[in-house]
Amino acid sequence: MRAYLERLPHSSTASWTMLNRRLEEAIPFQWHHHPEFELTLTLNSEGQRFIGDHVGSYGHADLVLVGPNLPHTWASRRKIDAAEPHVALVLWFRKAWIEAMIAGSVELQPVKELIDRSLAGLAFSPETGRALTAEFQALFDRPPLQRLLGLFAILAHLAGDESARPLSRAVPRHIEGRSSRLDRVLTHLHRHYAEPTSMGELAEVAALSVSGLHRMFTRQTQASITEYVAGLRIGEACSRLSATTEPIGFIAEAVGYPSLANFNRQFKALRGMTPRAYRALFRKPV
């Protein structure tokens, strides 16, 4: 399942976008990406989050900053208080806008370092999420200028949070003048990751030698092509295991593993459990 490009609405009274998302039934698995940064605080909900090649559990007051074009989604398992909805308080802002706001302001350099680190996705501690819950909720009742000041107050707080940890291992780090080569390779991989990967074919896509392709890819994504493809395949397998009843053998072949034994080994190496155990996490008790 390739991530779809989400086009976010823009406000005539604000330079950035926000959403108070309240869902009675569940937070659905919707694998997507967009060019904006996304800061999401999730309340009254437990489940799994998928960010790049990261898959992990989340709970109440889960707070994550996602970089531009990094595929992501949340998928809930249950509400903590069954009488209340799942809540996601989401803030989006464009890279060019936040960089322009920061430029020339020494006071905002910690925020610049924060957004630079978030390209791989950053998860903050539940304590940080709980501490900022009132600030997030207050944003929705403020006029535009006060909202803007509130956004930067939240970002400044996060910039000082030493508990933040990166999530995805394989994230493009664009280098000026070279990103188009990498973009072509990534587009090809996302379209054909379930098929056998030919290094020669990828080198032609990038207009590089095979050795040049390896150097560029590893330098800009911090992963080898083999590792990146495995992340895509296992990420797709996770989405199918959590959302469908398809047989595990069928899923293995669909994501590019004709050998079920090899699929099981790769899955356990990346997720720390077997596909069967992972699927059991999403089964509702009878």
Image (tube, rainbow, N blue to C red):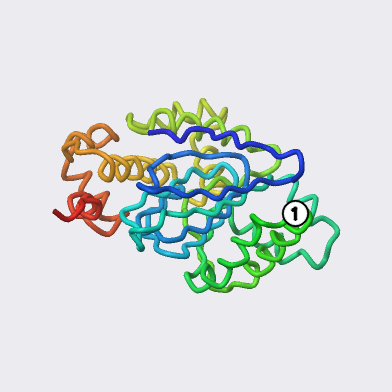
- Please rate how many residues cluster around mark 1, counting C-alpha atoms within 10 Å: few if below 14, some from 14 to 19, many from 20: few
Question: On the rendered structure, is 136 left or right of 83?
Answer: right
The residue that appears at 37% across and 33% down in the rendered structure is 1
**Amino acid on which disc 1 is placed:** Pro
Q: Is residue 137 above or below residue 130?
A: above
Q: Which residue, given by chain and number where applicable, does mark 1 sit on?
A: 143
- Where in the figure is residue 264, as x and y percent of width and height? 20, 48
- Where in the figure is residue 6, as x and y percent of width and height? 54, 35
Question: On the rendered structure, is 267 left or right of 94?
Answer: left
Q: Residue farthest to the front? A: 83
Q: Quadrant of residue 285?
A: bottom left
Q: Is residue 114 above or below residue 183?
A: below
- Where in the figure is residue 159, as x and y percent of width and height? 65, 67
Circle 1 — which element? loop
The residue that appears at 24% across and 37% down in the rendered structure is 257
The residue that appears at 13% across and 53% down in the rendered structure is 286
The residue that appears at 42% across and 64% down in the rendered structure is 60
